[in-house]
Amino acid sequence: MSTIHLHRTTILTPEQFVAGLTDFGPGRSKLFSNSADGYLKVHHRSHSQADVTEGSGGVWERLHYDWSDPGHVVLTTTDSNLWGGASGHAYTFTRRPDGTTDIDVVVVREGKNLRGWILGFVLGTIGKGVLEKAFENSVKAIQTRNGAVVPSGPSGRPALAAIR
């Protein structure tokens, strides 16, 4: 089992990020590259929970989304071709005094077969950078979607890249 911790500081509010995270409409892959439209199926959705199948590249999982606590969103894997056990994602949002938001994500990958075990091991070791890049791209895409202007840091690069 691999547990991966990710962190980003963003100019988004927690509500803006959660709105992107829970938008299961067409074009979701523009926000989350591992959620191709061809895999996406919403089985059920309420005001604070959803049951969704998503994936890409031959990997899929059915997730129970729970955003009833706006500071902590939990995605629990209920079925998958690779993941089982304690697999899922947990997002924690912390508002900072400067108006930015810290997003901390814990991704758990417990393989339910040999392929899942191997991929989980790779993601937990040398593959962590792939998840970090995907998460950073999702934050940037949701910022763009919200028309958020990212202030430049001292190097002229976006402040998001400088904050980490």
Image (spheres, grey):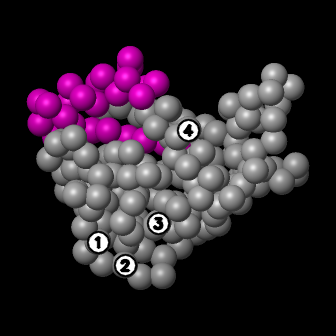
Question: Which badge, 4 or 1, comes first in the chain's sequence?
Answer: 1
The label shown at residue 42 is 1
Label 3 and label 4: CA atoms lie apart by 17 Å
Between 82 and 139, the residue placed more toward the observer is 139
Is residue 117 a member of the stretch shown in magenta?
A: yes
- Residue 71 seen in the current view: no
Identify the residue shown where x is 83% and y is 54%: 99
Residue indicated by mark 2: 45
Q: Are marks 3 and 1 in contact (CB under 8 Å)?
A: no
What is the three-letter code of the residue carrying label 3? Answer: Thr
Q: Are marks 3 and 2 in contact (CB under 8 Å)?
A: no
Question: Which badge, 3 or 4, comes first in the chain's sequence?
Answer: 3
In the picture as drawn, the residue positioned furthest to the top comes out as: 126
What is the three-letter code of the residue carrying label 4? Answer: Glu
Dot 3 lies on which element? loop
Q: Which residues are magenta?
A: 105-130
What is the three-letter code of the residue carrying label 2? Answer: Arg
Neighbour class for label 1 at 10 Å: few (<14), some, many (≥20)? some
Between 137 and 91, the residue placed more toward the observer is 137
* Count of labels in the image: 4
Residue indicated by mark 4: 136
Label 1 and label 2: CA atoms lie apart by 7 Å
Identify the residue shown where x is 29% and y is 58%: 37
Q: Is residue 49 left or right of residue 14?
A: left
Q: Is residue 46 left or right of residue 139?
A: left
Label 3 and label 2: CA atoms lie apart by 10 Å
Q: Are marks 1 and 2 in contact (CB under 8 Å)?
A: yes
Percent coordinates x, y for residue 156 in the rendering: 80, 27
Residue indicated by mark 3: 22
- Residue 52 seen in the current view: yes
